[in-house]
Amino acid sequence: MSYFAAALARPRQGWVATELDLDEIEDTDDAADLLREVDPDATLALMFVEADDEFLVVFRLDNGDEMRIFASDASFAEESRVGAVLLEELDEIDVSSSSDDSDEPELLGVPVGEADLLADLGVSARDLLALCAHEGMLPSDVMLAISRKIGSAEALTQLRGE
């Protein structure tokens, strides 16, 4: 399974983006170490992992030590060694209790982790789940939509050469 992993670190000004190689990670601590290396002084670092136009993982590291993870579909852990490492201990998200709105889009997968990990940046749990459920949205589209909302789109598009 192929994947693309992008790190976005926010130092004092702007965003720094770099591509990461996750082939050697053995656990989430290794992933956090890779994020720390992007900018050791960043108060916020994000890693987006998209795999085979099906799966999205958002990994957040605050102040170099507090990890939070969201994944659009738990089956990524069954499909990929990288997925298994990143999603190892995540719980399924109970989306039925998150909204009384009957017009909510039906999720295409089984999301796991913390859907509210970007809420303080302007992407609520509901918004994140809706982006992942939107028919026709690829993980790369979701990454770009999130990065637009949080102000890191320019760094991400430069990294991707778009």
Image (cartoon, helix red, strand yellow):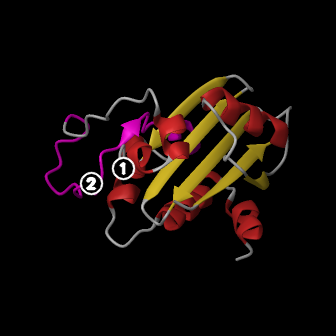
Marks 2,1: beta carbons within 8 A: yes
Q: What secondary structure is the magenta-colored segment mainly?
A: loop
Location of residue 64 by image quarter: top right
The mark that comes first in sequence, 2 or 1, is: 2
The amino acid at mark 2 is: Leu
Q: Which residue is mark 1?
A: 129
Task: Give the CA distance from mark 2 to mark 1.
Answer: 8 Å
Q: Position of residue 10 (x, y in %)?
A: 77, 43
For the point 25% across and 40% down, the residue is 95
Q: Which residues are magenta?
A: 97-122
For the point 70% across and 62% down, the residue is 156
Figure check: 48 above or below 93: below
Q: Secondary structure at mark 2?
A: loop
For the point 72% across and 51% down, the residue is 21
Task: Say which of 63 and 35 sits in front.
Answer: 35
In the picture, the quarter occupied by the C terminus is bottom right
Q: Position of residue 66 (x, y in %)?
A: 64, 23
- Label at residue 107: 2
Figure check: 150 above or below 116: below
For the point 22% across and 56% down, the residue is 106
